DNA sequence: GCGACAG
DNA sequence: ATCTTGTCGC
């Protein structure tokens, strides 16, 4: 177990977009670098799955990110890291990545483990321009990524069946951009979409394997708890 | 123009 | 995301 909870202030990379127009241009320039023709790591294998999440303190203009690596077989924490920085972008639906990614990259850099899969809070291809947070992070790191969101954003879906593992297509018009996945019986589903170098079937299988006791994957729960702690301890 | 809108 | 206590239920 690594205790990399020291807070390194990760500033936004120079040239990071400042305006919505610049951010849209960046999405447009990077979107075709997403790799969709790889199946991704095999579900059921012993993998290092890394959850990333971010917490904000608007008062102090601070953002704390956490990256927590779990063993997919045992769901035990193998390594963790945090980073603290300044908020790099306002929250704009469709541009979430520009707010979260700089600090997430800093945390991933400090993580003493090699991710086989990165699980993001939010969407990948389920995005107005098919380039959400998970896709963006995947392109920048080259790592296999998926997005697991708590809300359907602007997309529509029929209710999945009541059993754990049941799914329903998440639709943008008639295009399946992700899946509503029931991780617990009778509990609101999570919303899974492909990020980079993982197909949708495997993205859902990994999500289900990581979410055994609670609605959300353990990766997300661990990263959420750690980034909140890092923010509280930041100064 | 108005409302909706991942975190 | 964040503001925020107790409370109902398995």
Image: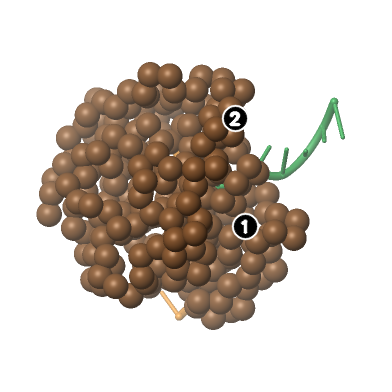
Chain colours: A brown, B green, C orange
Res A57 visible = yes
| Same subunit: marks 1 and 2 | yes
Q: Residue at x 60, y 37 (%)?
A: A93
Q: Chain of mark 1?
A: A
Residue A233 drawn above or below residue A40: above
Mark 1 or 2, nearer chain start: 2
Can residue A213 be seen here? The reply is no
Q: CA distance from mark 1 to mark 2?
A: 20 Å
Q: How many marks?
A: 2
- Judge left or right: residue A127 versus residue A134: right
> Who's the residue at 13% across and 45% down the image?
A3
Residue at the spot 55% in from the left edge and 42% down from the top edge: A32
Image point (63%, 42%), residue name: A129
Q: Is residue A5 left or right of residue A202?
A: left
In the rendering, at what x and y percent does residue A66 appear?
Answer: 30, 43
Q: Quadrant of the C terminus of chain A?
A: top left
Q: Which residue is labeled 2 in the image? A: A24
- Picture quadrant of residue A104: top left
Do the numbered discs 1 and 2 sit on residues whose CB atoms are within 8 Å?
A: no
The answer to which of A223 and A40 lies nearer the viewer is A40
Q: Is residue A163 left or right of residue C1?
A: right
Which of the pair A49/A130 is nearer the observer? Answer: A130
- List x then y, in percent, for residue A136: 47, 41
Q: Tag 1, which secondary structure?
A: strand
Q: Secondary structure at mark 2?
A: helix
Q: Which residue is mark 1?
A: A177
> In which quadrant will I find the N terminus of chain A?
bottom left
């Amino acid at each position: 177990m690594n205790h990399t909870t020291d807070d390194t202030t990760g500033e936004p990379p120079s040239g990071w977009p400042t305006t919505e127009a610049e951010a849209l241009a960046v999405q447009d320039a990077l979107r075709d670098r997403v790799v969709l023709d790889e199946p991704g790591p095999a579900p059921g294998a012993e993998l290092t799955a890394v959850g990333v999440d971010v917490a904000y303190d608007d008062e102090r203009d601070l953002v704390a990110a956490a990256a927590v690596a779990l063993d997919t077989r045992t769901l035990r924490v193998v390594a963790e890291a945090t980073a603290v920085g300044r908020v790099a972008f306002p929250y704009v639906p469709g541009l979430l990545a520009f707010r979260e990614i700089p600090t997430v990259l800093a945390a991933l850099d400090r993580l003493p483990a090699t991710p086989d899969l990165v699980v993001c809070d939010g969407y990948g291809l389920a995005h107005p321009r098919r380039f959400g947070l998970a896709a963006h992070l995947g392109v920048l790191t080259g790592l296999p990524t998926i997005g697991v969101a708590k809300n359907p954003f602007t997309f529509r879906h029929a209710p999945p069946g009541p059993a754990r593992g049941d799914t329903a297509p998440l639709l943008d018009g008639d295009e399946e951009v992700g899946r509503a996945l029931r991780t617990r019986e009778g509990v609101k589903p999570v919303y899974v979409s492909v990020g980079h170098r993982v197909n949708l079937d495997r993205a859902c299988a990994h999500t289900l394997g990581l979410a055994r006791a609670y609605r959300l994957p353990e990766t997300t729960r661990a990263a959420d708890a750690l980034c909140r702690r890092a923010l509280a301890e930041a100064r």
